[in-house]
Amino acid sequence: MCSHVFVHTTWNKVCTECGLLQRILLLDTYNVFSAPLMRGYNRTQRFRVKVDKLLGIHNGPKATDPIWKYLNDKKIFLNTPFDIRQTIQQSKLKLKHYDAIRIFSDTFTTFKIDTGTPIKIKETLMNRFNSLYYDWVKSMLRYFLTHMKSPLLVYLKPKTSRKRNIKYIQKLTQSQKNYEIQRYGLSKIHSQNV
């Protein structure tokens, strides 16, 4: 049995006794500005960034983004967030950054509103979002699998409270109605009275 004395190269290590070769991946030193290797979609993080932009505690698009030059060229016509939204809408830019309207408004107009303490507002919004998101995720999987009549239901935790289950189904039903109204418009959801 070899006691393995390894020699390291940039992409593998080799035992000097038996010749065992093991591939390795060395990462550069930690850098706070670099993203993790595998960064998937994170709904909470996306919501947090939107809240930060809304509250004006985000930098907005990169300084090199064409939106800055475009809005700077049109700033004589910009007085309110509505003006900025309309101007962006009329542009031929590919990335319009609608969620950065607050930042653009602060930069290119004199329009200001007092929102109170942004950190407290952010904390309240994030707490509400996290609560809603947790309830949604917790109940959504069972709801989908039940409607699919999937045998995978046996792996989920059984329902513990009939009352809570009814509450979740009502929330999901209401969320689905709201989604349909937003997506398809009110007139297609409800029948018109004659």
Image: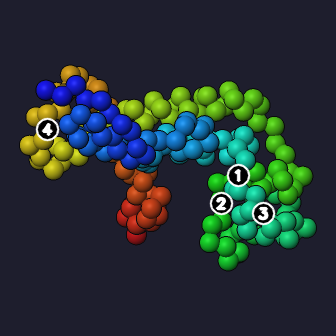
Amino acid, disc 3? Trp
Specify whether 190 is left or right of 153. Answer: right
Task: Check the image and report above or below for 176 versus 137.
Answer: below
Q: CA distance from mark 4 to mark 1?
A: 44 Å
Indicate the quadrant where residue 14 lies: top left
- Closer to the camera in the image, 101 or 19: 19
Name the colour scheme.
rainbow
Residue density around tag 3, few if under 14, some if 14–19, many if 20 or more, within 10 Å: some
Task: Indicate whether 121 appears above or below 83.
Answer: above
Residue matched to label 2? 97
User: Does the residue at mark 4 contact the one at mark 1 (Cβ under 8 Å)?
Assistant: no
The Cα–Cα distance between marks 2 and 4, rounded to whole angstroms, is 41 Å
Between 64 and 190, which is closer to the camera in this rendering?
A: 64
**Residue 169 visible in this rendered orientation of the protein:** no
SS class, disc 2: loop
Q: Amino acid at mark 4?
A: Leu
Most distant residue in the bottom direction: 92
User: What residue is pinned by disc 3?
Assistant: 68
Q: Residue at x 82, y 50 (%)?
A: 106
Q: CA distance from mark 4 to mark 3?
A: 51 Å
Front tag of 2 and 1: 1
In front of the other: 184 or 61: 61
Please give the residue where the numbered disc 4 appears in the rendered image: 153
**Residues at marks 4 and 3 touching, judged by CB atoms closer than 8 Å:** no
| Mark 1 residue element | loop
Q: Give the mark count.
A: 4
Query: Which mark, residue 111?
Result: none
